[in-house]
């Protein structure tokens, strides 16, 4: 198990290095001189003296390999420098933005897990019924709607339509911003905070909920054909006992694995959701950094996203080995 953990940690470091390197070189592949953009933008005839001063200040005149080496050293020492736009330390931006993304992803994952597992179990237990068909059709329709379209629909219904048609005050939800930013135990929102949180959380969780429901249904149906389920029936256990003690427990292993891995995906997939709802997380700040060619912020936030994704994947791999003894045995054999 130790060798397995070491290999996973090494893989995580390689992924972080590859992601940061890719973002760094893609930055230079984009058209336009970064120094000119910071001095006033392309095709706006910025003062050459200002451009030269910016290039000298941030080392943009150095060869790209020198800039790469200097920046990678900053990544290793957790010093991403300052934002090109406002001079703010990137580590301060990370500290400000990361909690909002983690909270949004946590609530989206909670919705995804609870609703997805419930719908999957319902479909599996009532295979071929109206509930199963409705779940299948609903999943297909929802998965076909782009995230930003779904977000705009929510805003139109709970924002514009609700206010113009005198809906109750509790149904008129805010459609922009993070609100009072009041949290307990880091992830528990206040009542007013929940009004700002619920819409982006639902939108972010929608596609993953569909995947969880279909995966739960498939694994439940496969598990119901297992020998131990037939043995449990032969012993006289009721269908409810079989589901709780045997079928559901074993069918949850791949589902829990997916949900854990998907937490990292929710961080990265939140870019559109955070942008539409103006949620001040990592995703919306990444968009701003990319638009303004703010390399320190861009690479710094990318590193954090990759790190979160990698750590969650590592934790899921280790927990999967703990849940399923066959994984532990195979990892020992490979080592």
Image (cartoon, rainbow, N blue to C red):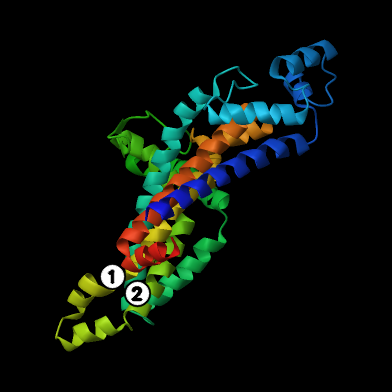
Residue 302 rendering spot, x and y as whole percentages? 57, 38
- Label 1 sits on residue: 248
Tags 1 and 2 touching, CB below 8 Å: yes
The image shows residue 163, relative to residue 39, as above or below, that is below
Q: Quadrant of residue 322?
A: bottom left
| Mark 2 element type | helix
Residue nearer the viewer, 121 or 317: 317
| Mark 1 element type | helix
Residue nearer the viewer, 233 or 330: 330
Please tell me which residue is depicted at 71% across the width and 14% down the height of the picture: 57
Please tell me which residue is depicted at 80% across the width and 14% down the height of the picture: 52
Tag of residue 29: none
The image shows residue 143, relative to residue 67, as above or below, that is below
Residue nearer the viewer, 105 or 316: 316
- Label 2 sits on residue: 220
Residue 191 rendering spot, x and y as whole percentages? 29, 36
Residue 116 rendering spot, x and y as whole percentages? 38, 62
Q: Quadrant of the C terminus?
A: bottom left
Residue nearer the viewer, 209 or 316: 316
Q: Quadrant of the N terminus?
A: bottom left
Of labels 1 and 2, earlier in sequence is 2
* Residue 293 visible in rendering: no
């Amino acid at each position: 198990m130790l060798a397995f953990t070491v290999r996973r940690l090494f893989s995580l470091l390689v992924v972080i290095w590859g992601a940061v390197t890719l973002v760094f070189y893609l930055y230079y592949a984009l058209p336009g001189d970064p120094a000119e953009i910071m001095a006033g933008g392309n095709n706006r005839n910025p003062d050459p003296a200002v451009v030269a001063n910016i290039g000298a200040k941030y080392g943009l005149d150095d060869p790209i390999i020198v800039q790469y080496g200097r920046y990678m050293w900053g990544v290793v020492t957790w010093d991403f420098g300052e934002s090109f736009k406002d001079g703010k330390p990137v580590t301060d931006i990370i500290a400000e933005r990361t909690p909002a993304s983690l909270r949004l992803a946590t609530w989206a994952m909670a919705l995804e897990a609870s609703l997805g597992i419930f719908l999957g179990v319902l479909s599996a237990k009532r295979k071929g019924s109206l509930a199963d068909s409705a779940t299948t059709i609903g999943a297909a329709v929802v998965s076909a709607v782009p995230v930003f379209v779904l977000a705009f629909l929510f805003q139109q219904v709970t924002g514009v339509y609700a206010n113009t048609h005198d809906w109750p005050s509790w149904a008129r939800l805010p459609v922009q911003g993070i609100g009072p930013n009041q949290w307990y135990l880091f992830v528990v929102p206040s009542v007013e905070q929940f009004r700002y949180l619920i819409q982006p959380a639902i939108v972010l969780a929608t596609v993953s909920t569909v995947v969880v429901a279909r995966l739960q249904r498939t694994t439940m149906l496969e598990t119901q054909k297992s020998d131990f389920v037939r043995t449990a029936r032969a012993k006289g256990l009721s269908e409810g006992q079989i589901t709780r003690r045997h079928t559901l427990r074993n069918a949850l292993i791949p589902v829990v694995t997916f949900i854990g891995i998907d937490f990292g995906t929710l961080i990265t997939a939140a870019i559109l959701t955070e942008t539409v709802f103006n949620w001040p997380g990592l995703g919306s700040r990444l968009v701003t950094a990319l638009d303004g060619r703010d390399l320190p912020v861009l690479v710094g936030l990318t590193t954090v996203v990759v790190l979160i994704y990698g750590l969650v994947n590592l934790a899921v791999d280790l927990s999967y080995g703990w849940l399923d003894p066959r994984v532990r045995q195979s990892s020992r054999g490979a080592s």
